[in-house]
Image (cartoon, helix red, strand yellow):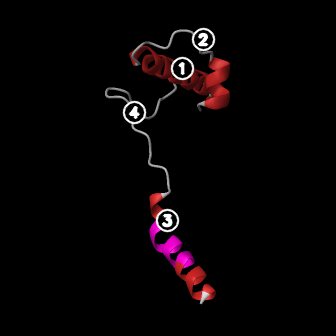
């Protein structure tokens, strides 16, 4: 009898728990784009330009927050390591 109970719980976990436990994709604030483009003479210059643009977009998000997030200083190095 215990085995049937355990099997029942396992089956319930498969049917009800698998999809509802997955995180949903976060939404960007209105007016912000999900990707940035970089322009440059070569690939490295384009990547550096894209990192600068990404840093600007993250700063927009931080300033749009209520109250604005101003105590954290965002650097291009931080963006290239943690955002891009």
Q: CA separation, marks 1 and 4?
A: 15 Å
Mark number for residue 17? 3
Q: Which residue does the numbered mark 1 point to in the structure image?
A: 55
Q: Which residue does the numbered mark 4 point to in the structure image?
A: 28
Q: Quadrant of residue 51?
A: top right
Numbered range of the magenta stretch = 9-16
Mark toward the viewer: 2 or 1: 2
In this view, the residue in front, 58 or 13, is 13
Q: Residue at x 46, y 63 (%)?
A: 19
Q: Which residue does the numbered mark 2 point to in the structure image?
A: 73
Circle 4: element type? loop
Q: CA separation, marks 3 and 2?
A: 40 Å
Labels 3 & 4 near each other (Cβ < 8 A)? no
Locate residue 32 relative to residue 48 in the image: left or right: left
Q: Residue lying farthest left? A: 30
Q: Does the magenta run of residues contain 41?
A: no
Residue 71's spot in the image, x, y percent?
Answer: 57, 9
């Amino acid at each position: 009898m215990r085995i049937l109970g355990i099997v029942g719980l396992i089956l319930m976990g498969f049917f009800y728990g698998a999809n509802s436990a997955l995180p949903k994709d976060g939404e960007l604030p209105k007016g912000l784009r999900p990707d940035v483009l970089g322009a440059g003479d070569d690939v490295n210059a384009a990547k550096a330009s894209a990192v600068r643009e990404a840093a600007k977009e993250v700063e927009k998000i931080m300033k749009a927050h209520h109250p604005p997030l101003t105590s954290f200083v965002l650097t291009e190095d931080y963006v290239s390591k943690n955002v891009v």
